[in-house]
Amino acid sequence: MTTAEIQALNDAHIINTYGTRKIAMQRGDGMRLWDADGREYLDFFAGIAVVNLGHCPASVTEAITEQARTLVHVSNLYYIEPQVKLAALLCEKTFADQWFFCNSGAESVEAAIKLARRYWAQKGTPKPVILSANESFHGRTIGAVTATGQPKYHEGFEPMLSDMGKFDYGDIAALEAAVTDKVGAVLLEPIQGEGGVRIPPKGYLEAVRKLCDDKGILLIFDEVQTGLGRTGSLFAHTQCGVTPDIMTVAKGLGNGVPIGALGCTAEAATGFSVGSHAATFGGNPLCSAAALATVTALTEPGFFEAAAEVGAYFAEGLRGLAEKFDTILEVRAAGLMIGVEMTKPVGPLVAAMIDSGVICGPAGPNVLRFLPPLIVSKEDIDTVLSKLETELGAF
Ligand SMILES: Cc1ncc(COP(=O)(O)O)c(C=O)c1O
């Protein structure tokens, strides 16, 4: 089909919630995408931080193909070999002792909210209030969107979930002031993604951990965007040496095959028991096989170090552009999660970059965001920096 034919069917039959660009991607390979009209793009967005290994990496494609031939779905009423192998690998590589699998980031956040509430209810000391940060993003289900600290996502959907409080991100005194004896959990992105690639001050996550310990509060890190190597380590929180009680994961976990997960300590896991939570598709053979192949490839020795090094190279190049263009206010980078704060809305710049063959996106109105696959080369980065320099000249 041509782009025009696909667009006609899209406009007739798809509910317009995305403001979709008039491009139909049809093929991907590594860092590159090709659209229905045969145009080539360099992908610096990875399907919103999802295809961290690039498009169609052989090991994941083989795992999916093999599993699709063998068994796609059976439900969690039976043991699932790829799922238990995935859980064991994730336990080996993270703080978590146990896992629950679902289908998306929002679902993993929803599971975390439910687990935290039930944990305290089971103990006989109900503490239903969950605190999350202003400007955060946690997904679109009603619990996750209530936790999301951006009122524009709440409009028209009220009433929101009750007993959900907010605090200013990066300010430990603000969190302290929001704590009451009804607060059972704090939900936090180690780096805010959709809120504009906001990196908290040094020592902040450690201070949050300490506050939670002092007050008897569960700490939930939402690593849906920061996880799976995006910031230079398997999960971002390991870089500050503190662990949460519960962690939410999705996006890069299946390198594009939908899978979400909640990992937690054995103690936090006692909040759930048989029948208390479920997902029909959660961790089914197909998505678990994809995730197992993905995490295996991501955790090859040296992979993150290489990604962190090219991330630093990219950030340095962007800071060079910031010296030339007054429209750039700040470059914020953690591994290959990069935000460039501009003086004005970035919509036209994103459109111009895509027209020039580079896929990137915004993070809030004024932040240009790059989330390339972690296999990106310095050569690809040089190409993007040069195109960005040209587009900034006209911005
Ligand atoms: C930090 C964070 N949490 C949760 C979500 C929601 O994930 P999903 O779109 O898979 O529901 C996102 C999506 O951008 C996210 O960035």
Image (cartoon, rainbow, N blue to C red):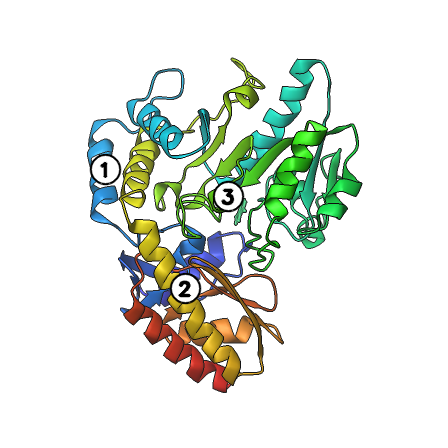
Mark 2 belongs to which amino acid?
Ala
Q: Position of residue 132 (x, y in %)?
A: 67, 42
Q: Which residue is mark 1?
A: 63
Q: Determine the residue positioned at 69% across, 36% down.
A: 211
Report whether 136 appears left or right of 176.
Answer: left
Q: Which residue is mark 2?
A: 312
Circle 1/circle 2 CB separation < 8 Å: no
> What distance separates the C-alpha of mark 1 from that of mark 3?
29 Å
> Quick one: label 2, few (<14), some, or many (20+) residues within 10 Å?
some
Q: Which residue is mark 3?
A: 237
Residue 40 location, quadrant: bottom left
> Does residue 233 appear in the picture of this structure?
yes
Q: Position of residue 340 (x, y in %)?
A: 53, 69
Mark nearest the camera among 1 and 3 is 3
Q: Determine the residue positioned at 49% across, 48% down.
A: 225
> Which comes sooner in the sequence, label 1 or label 3?
1
> Which comes sooner in the sequence, label 2 or label 3?
3
> Does residue 184 appear in the picture of this structure?
no
Comparing 372 with 304, the one in front is 304
> What distance separates the C-alpha of mark 2 from that of mark 3?
18 Å
Q: Position of residue 299 (x, y in %)?
A: 31, 42
Q: Is residue 326 above or below residue 372?
A: below
> What distance separates the C-alpha of mark 1 from that of mark 2?
32 Å
Mark 1 belongs to which amino acid?
Ala
Report whether 341 appears left or right of 79.
Answer: right
Report whether 275 appears left or right of 9.
Answer: right
> Which comes sooner in the sequence, label 1 or label 2?
1
Find out if the beta carbon at label 2 lies less than 8 Å from the nearest ligand 1 atom. no
